[in-house]
Image (cartoon, rainbow, N blue to C red):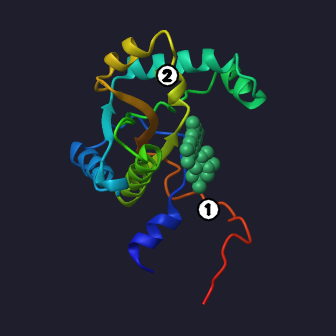
């Protein structure tokens, strides 16, 4: 089968990582894959922060879980109470994806395209990954937003939308794809 299609079909969200560091050239290749995503009107409204500071990652996890405890959604409250859960799964590298809303017509879609490109690049390089939307709770916290953005160098005017956890994993290549939803395609000829 075509390699790109094979990579798309074999990628899975993996939530368990080894502590082994990722080679810098692989990280750069993954970020570059993000940079090459399509974007509405070619605005490229993204910024990528490569985070490898364990102290900050742990703080993000602890503070996010505190916020989850107050959620109206039972599953989020359960996550907040789960002592074993690390929101970023103790991955050695996390890429934070932030975007510039003003002057972009399609920031969310553009950042999602960039994020998926990075997941696929990671898969093709033998790395496990997971898309983490929950990171928004930490960065969009009303009273702390400025301090938290500065902590990891998010540029002025950008807001955090997603994160991608990355690392080597014993589970890489193990999981089968989820069953796909049915009746989601039609053809008109
Ligand atoms: C927008 C978005 C946000 C997500 N946020 C999280 C998250 O915060 N934590 C997590 O563990 N997985 C998160 N995921 C991963 C999904 O749970 C996962 O893609 C889904 O269960 C399908 O599994 P698969 O990726 O292995 O096919 C997110 C995925 C998307 C597209």
Q: Which image quarter is the C terminus in?
A: bottom right
**Are there few (<14), some (14-19), or many (20+) residues within 10 Å of tag 2?**
some
Reply above or below: 77 against 95.
above
Could you give the CA–CA distance between mark 2 and mark 1, rounded to whole angstroms? 34 Å
* Quadrant in the rendering for residue 156: top left
Q: Position of residue 115 (x, y in %)?
A: 42, 48
Mark 2 vs 1, N-terminal side: 2
Residue for point 44% across, 41% down: 164
Which of these two is toward me, 32 or 9?
32
Give residue 4's mark. Answer: none
> Which element carries disc 1, helix, strand or loop?
loop
Q: Is residue 73 left or right of residue 108?
A: right
Q: Position of residue 56 (x, y in %)?
A: 39, 19
Indicate left or right for 47 with 60 as reference. Answer: left
Q: Which residue is mark 2?
A: 140
Q: Position of residue 149 (x, y in %)?
A: 36, 20
Residue lying farthest right? 74
Q: Which residue is mark 1?
A: 176
Q: Which quadrant would residue 148 be assigned to in this image?
A: top left
| Ligand 1: quadrant of the figure | top right
Q: Residue at x 51, y 28 (%)?
A: 136
Residue 89 visible in the shown view:
yes
Q: From the viewer's perspective, tell me whether residue 175 is left or right of residue 146.
A: right
Q: Nearer the viewer, mark 2 or mark 1?
A: 2
Q: What residue lies at 43% left-to-right and 16% top-to-bottom?
A: 145
- Disc 2 secondary structure class: loop
């Amino acid at each position: 089968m075509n390699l790109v299609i094979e990579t798309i079909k074999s990628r899975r969200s993996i939530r368990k990582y080894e502590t082994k560091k990722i080679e810098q050239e692989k990280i750069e290749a993954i970020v570059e894959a993000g940079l090459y995503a399509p974007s509405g009107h070619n605005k490229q409204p993204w910024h990528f922060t490569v985070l490898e500071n364990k102290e900050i990652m742990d703080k993000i996890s602890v503070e996010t879980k505190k916020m989850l405890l107050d959620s109206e959604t039972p599953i989020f409250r359960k996550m907040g109470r789960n002592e074993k859960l690390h929101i970023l799964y103790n991955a050695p590298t996390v890429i934070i994806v932030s975007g510039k809303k003003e002057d972009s017509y399609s920031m969310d879609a553009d950042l999602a395209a960039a994020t998926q490109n990075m997941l696929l690049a990671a898969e093709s390089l033998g790395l496990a990954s997971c898309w983490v939307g929950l990171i928004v709770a930490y960065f969009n916290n009303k009273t702390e937003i400025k301090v938290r953005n500065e902590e990891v160098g998010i540029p002025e005017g950008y807001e955090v939308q997603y994160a991608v956890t990355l690392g080597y994993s014993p589970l890489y290549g193990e999981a089968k794809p989820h069953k796909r939803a049915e009746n989601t395609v039609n053809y008109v000829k």
